[in-house]
Amino acid sequence: MSCSVQDHAETRLLIQNPEYKILNSQLLRSFFNIFIPLRCPGCGDVLPHDGSSLCLSCLLNLPYTDYASRPGNAVEKMFWGRVPIEAACSILHFTRHSPVQSILHHIKYHGDRASAINMGRLMGEILEKHAPYSLIDGIVPLPLYRKREKERGYNQSALLAEGISEVMSVPVIRGLLVRTGNTNTQTKKNRQQRWENVKNAFCMAGDPDLGIRRILLVDDVVTTGATLEAAASVLLRETGFRICISTLAYAHR
Ligand SMILES: [Zn+2]
């Protein structure tokens, strides 16, 4: 028996309904989890069927920095004498061959959006306990170069920002800052070389007059701080915002 035009229209409306999409994705997740178990992005162990994004062992053993409660921490010091931000912190220590490296790898290269949002929630739960982070009224994710975001399909910093936003009930400000040039890889560069590489990499694109006073600039990892410094410099020059910075991880050099 063929469907009527009205049946098709009703089906289309049902599929477009956000609640249907959520229910559908949850059903799909449960269905596939029976045959293809979801694995912890930190260690690769099979995850329980309770919607967890990290196994209990990884969750309990994450290497927290405690920097959000410590003004003058190692991440904040990177910006001293360079750009007058209000506070900076990373939530976790990054070390090679660790669950944190594996989680970041999943977030950046395996399309693991759920882990990115989940780690953003973890950031939010810590940041909301400590001033001045608890006083922010906007979140700005560090933008990716447009071509890279298109290739990846998303900006991992924007997903972290989404998770923070969910916990702290503070809006994510999109499109305010854009990345203007395709900078070379930063991996093997020292601080000065990194700064030369990124100093003109950002510009304002949105309206800075948003009634916002204090923003949180978010990125996944900080190594020398050169990229965040370039972005914060543009925001400070073009807006009246006070700026706090937070990254998920801190890679020691
Ligand atoms: Zn694990």
Image (cartoon, grey):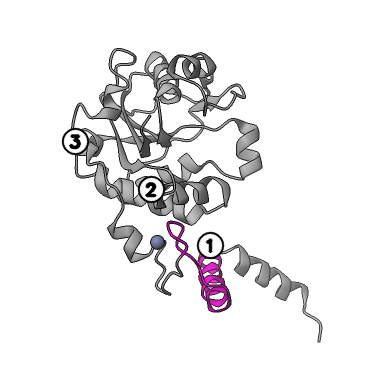
Viewer-side label of 2, 1: 2
Which badge, 2 or 3, comes first in the chain's sequence? 2
According to the picture, the residue beneath numbered tag 3 turns out to be 131
Place of residue 228 in the rendered image (x, y in percent of width and height, measured from the top left): 41, 25
According to the picture, the residue beneath numbered tag 1 turns out to be 18
Position of residue 183 relative to residue 113, above or below, is: above
According to the picture, the residue beneath numbered tag 2 turns out to be 120
Q: Can you name the residue that lies furthest to the front here?
A: 97
For the stretch drawn in magenta, the main secondary structure is helix
Q: Judge from the rendering whether residue 227 lies leftward or rightward of residue 93; answer left or right.
A: right
| Residue beneath the point at 23% across and 38% down | 68
Residue 67 shown in magenta: no
Element at badge 3?
Answer: loop
- Cβ–Cβ under 8 Å for marks 2 and 1: no
Q: Which mark is residue 133?
A: none
Position of residue 209 relative to residue 12, above or below, is: above
Element at badge 2?
Answer: helix
Residue 86 visible in image: yes
Which badge, 3 or 1, comes first in the chain's sequence? 1
Element at badge 1?
Answer: helix
Q: Decide: few, some or many residues near mark 3? Use Cα within 10 Å; few <14, some 14-19, many ≥20.
A: few
